[in-house]
Amino acid sequence: MSLQHAHADEKRDVGHEINSVSTDDDIAAAFVPDRAQWIDRRLERRVAILGSAVLFGMTKDLSLSVVDNSTRPPVTSTERLSWATSIFYFGMLAGLYPLTFTLQRFQLGRVLGPVVIVWGAIAMLTATVTSWRGLFAQRFFLGFVESIIPTAYMCIVSSYYTQQEQALRQSWWFSSTGGWTIIGGAINYGFAQITGGSLSSWQYIYLLAGAITILFGCFCFILPNSAVSAWFLNPEERIVAVERLRKGQTGVRCQKLKVSQLREAVLDIKIWLVAFMMAGAYTVNGAVSGFGPLIVSTFGYTTLESILFQFPLGGVVFIFILLTGYLTSRIPDIRIVLLILCCLPVIAGCTMIWRSTWSRRPATPVVGYTLIGFFGPVVSLIISIGMANVAGATKKSFTAAAIFAAYCVGNIVGPQLIKTPTLKRHYPELWLGLIICYSIVICLAIVLYAFLRRENRRRERLQLNEEERDRLAFRDISDKENPYFRYVL
């Protein structure tokens, strides 16, 4: 059934004009962001757990570090740990496009529910792994099933909210990246106190995380397909939730796969600019999630102290993701400007860690490590810029998948920049590599700003019929096909 027909039917059911309800009311806000935060907490938890688990005996139990006794002094290699981190994202890349387009083709709850339950089961099975080879296999399949989660919620938020609102709503669920760094760190700190039992501390961590995820998977079965069929809204509220999207011309969820939109997305330069920005920005996460506590421990801090130092990092991520999201919802066209500004503390933090003196318990590298947390708002803004500047269900799905594929690439590259033999020189490849990546992100952001601004000016010069705007709003056409669409900067 077309949206126009569904819309008309719902109006007849209501029995009076939609004008009786304020279209300014954010009906969807009562539902989507809260649930979205649950999803992203689980995504970030799976990755961050590895960073803490290596401090709780996983490195030794699964032989993730190898000592080369042929050199004097002996050299410890953590290449296996680097690959354990990277292989997770190879799994995500493998599952990304098939699962994303499966999600578009079928009902949301019927796809997400089973996948999240399998995801939790695989997480729990980590506790049964007995070798680094087994961990590699487990990490690949864990990444495969997780690949559907962030793309699903990027698309959900973009189909429930207007362009102006999306940055704040995307920031709500993405801020749990920092929130879980704090909460997960506290939980891991608690598990570190376990000294008895037949299992190691790191095994208890995975059992808890997997069990909670399975419980959440049961909830996913009742997720609605879109605002048109949202069970938590009455017929009148559904109309309001859909009508409020008309001005932005972004459309609503459509389960039909359109080859024309797929072809357009592949050739759309702005999607690739956003994807390359995401790849560059997320190299930080690949290194920090898998090696953050380990790096801090090299400053002379104990295992437990290293975990506690994740708290200020998580706080920076959490606070500034929400702050930038709020500012972009209040002030139009400042997303790219804020993105560039947030890149600067990351570059400063990397420089402070690299060039400072690593004496016992030094302050400067720890402060620099905290500043790296500004990568959070950078990535959140990239997501909101990418998803707010495309229209058409198939093109949205492709864009979300492209952004997340770039996310995987950044996370694969990050751990490979850490070379254990260069510890005495403060991992120069890592920090220099991150500085270069964020400098590239700034350059690409400037290019994207100029491109979108020029396109908006071109469209403003067109002589358009405003009555046609309403007719095109829900036809599931792309941003390029719709001359009324305006890009956010």
Image (tube, helix red, strand yellow):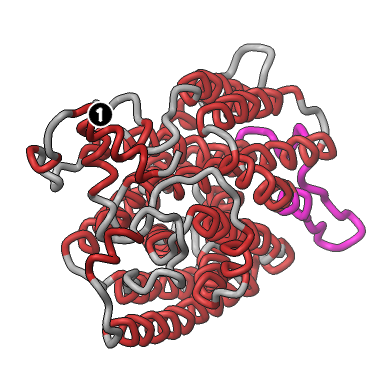
Relative placement, left or right, of 373 versus 71 is left
Q: Provide the residue designation for mark 1.
A: 235
User: Over which residues does the magenta segment extend?
Assistant: 56-83
Q: Tell me what residue is drawn at x 51 percent, y 34 percent.
A: 108
Q: Amino acid at mark 1?
A: Pro
Expressed as whole percent of the image width and height from the top left, the position of residue 81 reads: 72, 48
Expressed as whole percent of the image width and height from the top left, the position of residue 294 reads: 58, 50
Relative placement, left or right, of 226 versus 261 is left
Q: Check the image and name the residue furthest to the right.
A: 70
Q: Visible in this render: residue 286?
A: no
Does the magenta run of residues contain 113? no
Q: Tell me what residue is drawn at x 63 percent, y 12 percent.
A: 197
Residue 428, compared with residue 162, is above or below; it is below
Residue at disc 1, secondary structure: helix
Q: Tell me what residue is drawn at x 27 percent, y 59 percent.
A: 470
Does the magenta run of residues contain 72? yes
Foreground of the two, 295 or 362: 295
Foreground of the two, 107 or 190: 107
Expressed as whole percent of the image width and height from the top left, the position of residue 163 reads: 30, 59
Q: Check the image and name the residue furthest to the top.
A: 197
Q: Tell me what residue is drawn at x 41 percent, y 55 percent.
A: 475
Q: Visible in this render: residue 419?
A: yes
State which quarter of the image contains the C terminus. Answer: bottom left
